Amino acid sequence: MFQVRIHGRGGQGVVTASELLSVAAFDEGRHAQAFPTFGSERTGAPVVSFCRIDDKEIRSREPVSRPDAVIIQDPTLLHQVDLFGGLDTDGYILLNSERDFDELGLAEFIAGFRPERVRTMPATAIAREHLGWPMPNSVLLGGFAGLCKLVSLDAVTQALRDRFPGKLGDLNTAAATVACEFVRESLTAAPAAGAGGVHA
Amino acid sequence: MLEQLEGSQAVARTIGMCRPEVIAAYPISPQTHIVEKLSDMVRTGEIDPCEYLMVESEFGAMSACIGASAAGARSYTATASQGLLFMAEALYNASGLGLPIVMTLANRAIGAPINIWNDHSDSMSQRDSGWIQLFAETNQEACDLHIQAYRLAEQLSLPVMVCMDGFILTHAFEQVDLPTQEQVDSYLPSFEPQQILDPAEPMTIGAMVGPEAFTEVKYLMHAKQLQALDEIPLIAADFKETFGRDSGGLVRGYRTEDAETIVVALGSVLGTIEDVIDGLRDQGVKIGALAIKCFRPWPIDEVREALQRADRVVVIEKAFAVGAGGIVGQNVRLALSACEATVFDIVAGLGGRPITRKSLGALFDDIFEGRIEPNRLHFLDLKKDVVERELNRLDDGRSPGPHAENIIRDIGTVASDSH
């Protein structure tokens, strides 16, 4: 079983992101379960969502406390929430920030991780450019498809098109594709760049 | 067709295929997505003919369903928590009048303190209201149970409540095999009311009944509920024939054949429990689970049959009777009155506290090692230090203020920290 935890703030599409990830995994023939934690249903409040993916039926419904991957949609949560709780050093981290882990003061923490599994990426900037508004969720999903082979970019974009028909789907697909390429290029150019992050 | 979708959407689309003629509902978390979707389906003509009534309250919702059902319309509503309490008077009218209304209950805690998260205190508060109560373990089963619920309700002329865990199921995305309209039509015949208000042939229902006949009317309600114990397995078997999968029924055993310990629970927590059981089985522990699918009527014979060979029965429930103990636990004891098994009453998952594999593993370990007293209510993952601090505050003698606010001040609240 592969477990993903997504952190962000109300209004950033954190819940939608885990739902879309589950749809992408389902479309690739896997079992998937996505669910949110609820309570702070206010714009700007910390929000968490979860996605489990497996090749067999998923029965457990407890929140994900030991994730294999953490996606962080808002870097300002770094000082508020225990974002990396339960994550082992062989886990994946995708963090939305224009700064790298060094600049975020995470160099020491990230040093123990496998460098090809951790990246920061300017998801909000990519969203602004390709969607026209600062919604980082579909960008990060595209980036995640590039970072981790859990789901393909095709499955992610198909899930985006199903959820957002028409022009909105086109825009989100473009943003996710750019994000995926961005991460892939950074992995090719500097596989070990994780500790230093990558710049746009 | 197999789809990956939110539980609420799956349930709403299934209800649509049941061809309801009147839907009356008032939105309340975590039921909202279901009735939003249904109102949309009525507006777009996806459910037709159907009237969607925007009512002013849950009391209005149930009252509208009562009127509609008495007039021969297949009726539906959904609610949760305080909304169910606001319906309480009308719930008893629906069951007392024998009207086959189907309701989804998106299980949520009851305040105060106000809490929107899942537990079973709402359904348990109305366990004696005369409604049949079915509990879904998954979103697939939630859908399937609604189809079976209409069949059961209309066959016996009784209202049926389908309980599904709020948020945990209603807001979870997982795969659901949605039936086709043809399948549902072939399984669920059109509504033939056993009593009908018709202006062409006027009659009244809901007469005042005095001491001369009240007991007899109530006896018939009880007899009809007991009849449901015979009908539910048949309806589930017929469902399997049409749809090709097991869903519903009265109880379901999991690895109980040679089990010395059997865990009893209702609803979506069974999945987590089964994962823990598989781990213990791998270590050679003879443990199994019994899912209660139908809590009202209480399937006493089936529960006894499933549990009577166990040494220990661990009842894990998401509600309790304040000042008395476990609710499901007491019903289980009734079933086991002539048996030797030791019964443990565990309250867990109150107000949305996650029931984790780790906590369940530690609980079973404590039970095996004799660290938990049987026949006494045990609160899983109770923060004893928090409780003690609050009790000490009371002992100070000064006006201690409200518990909820005191505790929140002590521990702080970070909603996103619940993992």
Image: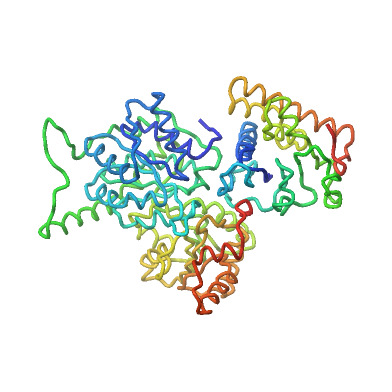
Is the residue A187 above or below the residue A83 in the image?
above
Q: Is residue B306 above or below residue B233?
A: below
Query: Is residue B176 toward the left or the right of residue B80 in the image?
Result: right
Counting labels gives 0
**Measured from the top left, where is residue B342 in percent x and y?**
46, 72
* Closest to the observer, A198 or B95: A198
Residue, x 48% and y 49% (percent of image)?
B165
What residue appears at the point 64 percent right and 54 percent down from the top-left corner? B417
Q: Residue at x 89, y 32 (%)?
A: A189
Residue B236, position as x, y percentages in the image: 38, 44
Can residue A139 be seen here?
Answer: yes
Image quadrant holding the C terminus of chain B, namely bottom right
Q: Front-most of B300 and B408?
A: B408
Picture quadrant where residue B25 is located: top left
Q: Is residue A62 left or right of residue B46?
A: right
Whole-percent x and y of residue B127? Answer: 34, 56
Residue at 56% across / 74% down in the picture? B388
Q: Find residue A89 and report its horizontal and vertical position in percent.
A: 80, 51
Against A6, residue B348 (above or below) is below
